[in-house]
Image: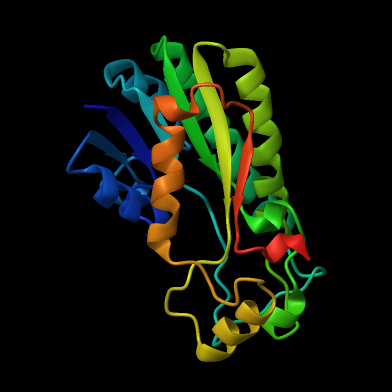
């Protein structure tokens, strides 16, 4: 039975992954909703010192979900403070979590999650001309380089890879789903369960020679 730690365990991706692994493996959950503050380096150090596991799956992240009833921002409205918060959560704290896992485990693997917006810029046409926060895309691009850096320095004992998921369908309005699907060769959004197999693969001996890699599962969105 594998010991698996899932950060962001209560989120969309994290909760689905926990559900997938719970019947066959021992899953440890970390999430702000459970009172775990991963921005607190002292907490991170203490937790990972006391909780060893074979695999670390990082799903926690700060994301801006555009609210059709709220204020929409453009490039000229984003504050530097907002930019900094994305980098602090999605990149710096991610580094802290990965480092403490590695410090306290001699062997294992780490799976990080980036985004299609870590590869390409968000298309304003999908958001009625408004812009997703620049901090999100930049931080998610940083996740890819961080993954490669960690892979190079932690090999051969700990493997580190990243997954780039496409847009997951969940309560978006019909117009958004239709427009996003048109931009995707698979002609649909992702189902949240479609990431489970990839994560399982990266947390197994089947991927024993895979490290520093980025697996893109976006239905071809970034292939155009």
User: Residue at 80% of width from left, 68% of height from top?
Assistant: 75
Q: Is residue 97 left or right of residue 1?
A: right
120 and 134: which is toward the camera: 120
Residue 191 seen: yes
Residue 133 seen: no
Q: Residue 206 location, x and y as percent?
A: 44, 29
Q: Is residue 139 left or right of residue 102?
A: right
Q: Residue 156 location, x and y as percent?
A: 55, 11
Give the vertical position of 21 relative to 182 (above or below): above
Quadrant containing the C terminus in the rendered view:
bottom right
Q: How many marks?
A: 0
Extreme residue in the bottom direction: 175
Type of colouring: rainbow
Quadrant location of residue 24? top left
Q: Is residue 197 left or right of residue 113?
A: left
User: Residue at 41% of width from left, 9% of height from top?
Assistant: 106
User: Residue at 22% of width from left, 34% of height from top?
Assistant: 25
Q: Is residue 36 left or right of residue 96?
A: left
């Amino acid at each position: 039975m594998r010991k698996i730690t899932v950060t962001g365990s209560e989120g969309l991706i994290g909760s689905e992954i926990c559900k997938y692994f719970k019947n066959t493996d021992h899953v440890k959950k970390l999430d702000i909703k459970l009172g775990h503050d991963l921005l607190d380096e002292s907490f991170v150090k203490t937790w990972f010192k006391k909780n060893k596991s074979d695999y670390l799956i990082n799903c926690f992240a700060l994301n801006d979900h555009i609210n059709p009833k709220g204020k929409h921002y453009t490039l000229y409205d984003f504050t530097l403070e907002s930019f900094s918060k994305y980098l602090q959560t999605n990149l710096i704290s991610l580094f802290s979590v990965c480092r403490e896992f590695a410090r306290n485990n001699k062997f294992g693997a780490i799976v990080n999650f980036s985004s299609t917006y870590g590869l390409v810029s968000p298309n304003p046409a999908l958001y009625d001309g408004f812009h997703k926060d620049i901090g999100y895309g930049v931080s998610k691009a940083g996740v890819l380089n961080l993954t490669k850096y960690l892979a190079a320095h932690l090999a051969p004992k700990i493997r580190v890879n990243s997954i780039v998921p496409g847009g997951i369908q969940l309560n978006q309005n019909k117009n958004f789903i239709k427009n996003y699907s048109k931009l995707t060769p698979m002609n649909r959004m992702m189902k949240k369960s479609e990431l489970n197999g990839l994560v399982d693969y990266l947390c197994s001996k089947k991927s024993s020679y895979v490290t520093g890699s980025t697996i893109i599962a976006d239905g071809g969105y970034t292939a155009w």
